[in-house]
């Protein structure tokens, strides 16, 4: 069985959204200084690294991270290579068997230097969320920090995906994952009241 770890490593040099809380790992106890154990603490945004956006991120009445239906985060998925496309259209997705794999992960290859936050990222055409919803898609993931343009103020793609009932995963690591069908396991941390949650996400290779 082939397993692809599609989670970005959380480390001190990983870029975060400008103005957001940087990731830090603090060593609070150390065997080297006489403590019986090594012990650490972390500080991070709930949108650090690979994460899920809860509807509450954009809707004051939306669901928070701990209420997300985990069945959406586990099951058949398809990785679609859309490298080089700046606005991903319905036509770009039409050749993939989305109906068989209701979790769609988009491999753009657009964020290669994880220490530098991107100034621009590929995004979806406005009609893509409804196109996906009409084909039974329940989850959309992408390998950049946002499904909208970085400098967008209105975040229309986020809002349309949420309206369509599609869970959003961002900042996936797909560089080593070929396009194709997999089983996704991507479980967000159970952070009560949060507008998002970091996660460990993997893909298991399947056949057929």
Image (cartoon, rainbow, N blue to C red):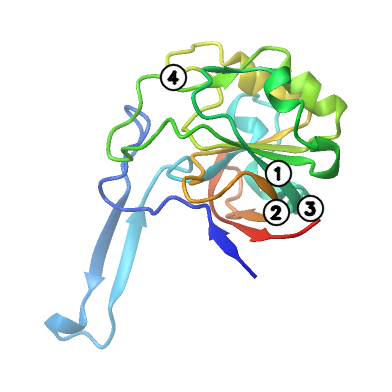
Instruction: Looking at the image, tell me whether mark 4 or mark 3 is earlier in sequence order.
Output: 3
Side (left or right) of 15 relative to 141? left
Instruction: Looking at the image, tell me whether mark 4 or mark 1 is earlier in sequence order.
Output: 1
- Looking at the image, do the residues carrying marks 1 and 2 touch, with CB atoms under 8 Å apart? yes
Label 3 Cα neighbours within 10 Å, binned few <14 / some 14-19 / many ≥20: few
Instruction: Looking at the image, tell me whether mark 3 or mark 1 is earlier in sequence order.
Output: 3
Indicate the quadrant where residue 163 lies: top right
Q: Which residue is mark 2?
A: 182
Quadrant occupied by the N terminus: bottom right
Q: In whole angstroms, how far apart are the C-alphas of marks 3 and 1?
A: 16 Å
Dot 2 lies on which element? strand
Q: In whole angstroms, how far apart are the C-alphas of marks 4 and 3?
A: 30 Å
Please identify, in this view, whether the residue under mark 4 or under mark 1 is nearer the observer: 1
Q: Does residue 25 lie above or below 98 as drawn?
A: below
Label annotation for residue 78: 1
Q: In whole angstroms, how far apart are the C-alphas of marks 3 and 2?
A: 15 Å
Q: Which residue is mark 3?
A: 71
Dot 1 lies on which element? strand
- Residue in view at x 33 percent, y 27 percent: 18
Q: Which residue is mark 4?
A: 150
Instruction: Looking at the image, tell me whether mark 4 or mark 2 is earlier in sequence order.
Output: 4
Instruction: Looking at the image, tell me whether mark 3 or mark 2 is earlier in sequence order.
Output: 3
Side (left or right) of 64 relative to 26? right
Label 4 Cα neighbours within 10 Å, binned few <14 / some 14-19 / many ≥20: some
Q: Does residue 149 lie above or below 190 as drawn?
A: above
Q: Position of residue 10 (x, y in %)?
A: 37, 53
Q: In whole angstroms, how far apart are the C-alphas of marks 1 and 2?
A: 6 Å
Dot 3 lies on which element? helix
């Amino acid at each position: 069985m082939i397993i692809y770890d599609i989670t970005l490593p959380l480390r001190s040099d990983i870029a975060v959204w400008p103005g957001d809380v940087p990731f830090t790992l603090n060593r609070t106890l150390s065997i080297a200084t006489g403590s019986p154990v090594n012990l650490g603490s972390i500080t991070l945004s709930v949108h650090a690294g690979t994460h899920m956006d809860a509807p509450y991120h954009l809707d004051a009445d939306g669901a928070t991270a701990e209420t997300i239906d985990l069945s959406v985060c586990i099951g058949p998925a398809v990785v679609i290579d859309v490298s080089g496309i700046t606005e991903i259209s319905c036509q770009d997705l039409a050749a993939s068997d989305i109906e068989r794999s209701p979790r769609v992960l988009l491999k753009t290859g657009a964020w290669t230097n994880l220490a530098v936050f991107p100034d621009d990222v590929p995004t979806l055409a406005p009609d893509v969320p409804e196109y996906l919803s009409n084909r039974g898609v329940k989850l959309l993931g992408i390998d950049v920090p946002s499904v909208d343009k970085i400098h967008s103020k209105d975040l229309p793609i986020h809002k349309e995906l949420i309206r369509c009932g599609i869970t959003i995963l961002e900042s996936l690591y797909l560089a080593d994952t070929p396009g194709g069908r997999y089983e996704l396991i991507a479980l967000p941390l159970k952070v009560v009241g949060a507008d998002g949650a970091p996660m460990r996400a993997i893909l298991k290779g399947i056949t057929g």
